[in-house]
Image (cartoon, rainbow, N blue to C red):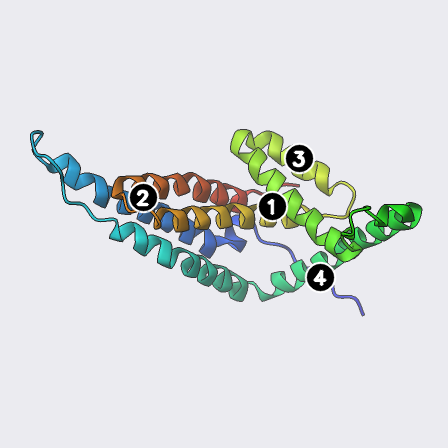
């Protein structure tokens, strides 16, 4: 017996804990950078050398991934029925992408041999790569023009092999992961000012992730 789909909440409610964690992280990144810059600003103009620490930046990079993972888990726990529906939709679109890839292989069997000894991706691998590629493409487009990126989402989903929310969620994941990598890079710099600048550059990524997590498209 089929189960009637439930009414989905607005995305800003579905991902409320993640959005809140991202906004908190934006503030923490700014505060960590401020801990570097404030002593420099407060020092007398004639002072040579100002003692500053990059420890706040290191703390942010240490805790960011755990904070965001916990927020995602809390969102999932709040909406178990929605999670079940999302997983069912993901299985459907994944199967659809696999079917297309298999059909393409059947039409062009010679394409399976690259001539380099490296086999082409399987249908299942192609299906996963297609979603990842769509998410990356939308995340990049959203940086330049959210309206065009939204149109791109609808275009990518038009064939039924990708879901609108599925693409947006993948774009969120891509953007968040890039932000976390940026924070990991910040901690590797001995120069506190450089560490602070890189830490601040993650703010734009986390802000974009908030916009993607909040976006409701038809």
For label 1, the residue is 168
Density class for disc 2 (Cα within 10 Å; few <14, some 14-19, many ≥20) is many
> Residue at the spot x=31%, y=56% of the render?
59
Q: In terms of image quadrants, where is residue 94?
A: bottom right
Front tag of 2 and 3: 2
The answer to which of marks 2 and 3 sits earlier in the sequence is: 3
Residue under pointer 2: 195
Helix or strand or loop: what does disc 4 sit on?
helix
Q: Are discs 2 and 4 less than 8 Å apart at CB?
A: no
Instruction: State the count of labels.
Output: 4
Q: Viewer-nearest of labels 1 and 2?
A: 2
Q: Which residue is mark 4?
A: 88
Q: Secondary structure at mark 2?
A: helix
Q: Distance from label 2 to label 3 (Cα)? A: 35 Å
First in residue order: circle 4 vs circle 1: 4
Name the image quarter holding residue 3.
bottom right
Q: CA distance from mark 3 to mark 1?
A: 11 Å
Disc 2 versus disc 4: nearer the observer: 2
Do residues under tags 4 and 1 come within 8 Å of each other at their CB atoms?
no
Alpha-carbon span between mark 3 and mark 4: 23 Å
> Relative to residue 193, is residue 83 drawn left or right?
right
Expressed as whole percent of the image width and height from the top left, the position of residue 39 reads 15, 41
Task: State the residue in front, 91 or 194.
Answer: 194
Q: CA distance from mark 4 to mark 1?
A: 17 Å
Quadrant of image for the N terminus: bottom right
- Identify residue for label 3: 152
């Amino acid at each position: 017996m089929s189960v009637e789909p439930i009414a989905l909440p607005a995305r800003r409610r579905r991902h409320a804990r993640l959005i809140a964690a991202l906004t908190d992280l934006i503030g923490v990144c700014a505060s960590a950078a401020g801990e570097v810059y404030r002593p420099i600003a407060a020092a007398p103009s004639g002072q040579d050398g100002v003692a500053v620490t990059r420890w706040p930046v290191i703390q942010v990079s240490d805790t960011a991934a755990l904070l965001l993972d916990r927020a995602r888990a809390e969102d999932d726990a709040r909406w178990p029925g929605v999670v079940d529906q999302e997983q069912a939709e993901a299985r459907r679109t994944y199967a659809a992408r696999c079917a297309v890839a298999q059909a393409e292989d059947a039409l062009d069997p010679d394409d399976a041999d690259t001539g380099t000894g490296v086999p082409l991706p399987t249908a299942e691998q192609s299906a996963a790569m297609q979603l990842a590629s769509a998410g990356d493409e939308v995340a990049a487009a959203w940086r330049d023009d959210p309206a065009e990126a939204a149109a791109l989402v609808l275009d990518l989903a038009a064939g039924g092999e990708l879901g609108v929310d599925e693409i947006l969620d993948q774009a969120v994941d891509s953007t968040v992961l890039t932000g976390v990598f940026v924070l990991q890079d910040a901690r590797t710099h001995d120069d506190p000012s450089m560490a602070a600048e890189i830490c601040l550059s993650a703010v734009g990524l986390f802000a974009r992730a908030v916009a993607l997590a909040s976006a409701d498209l038809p």
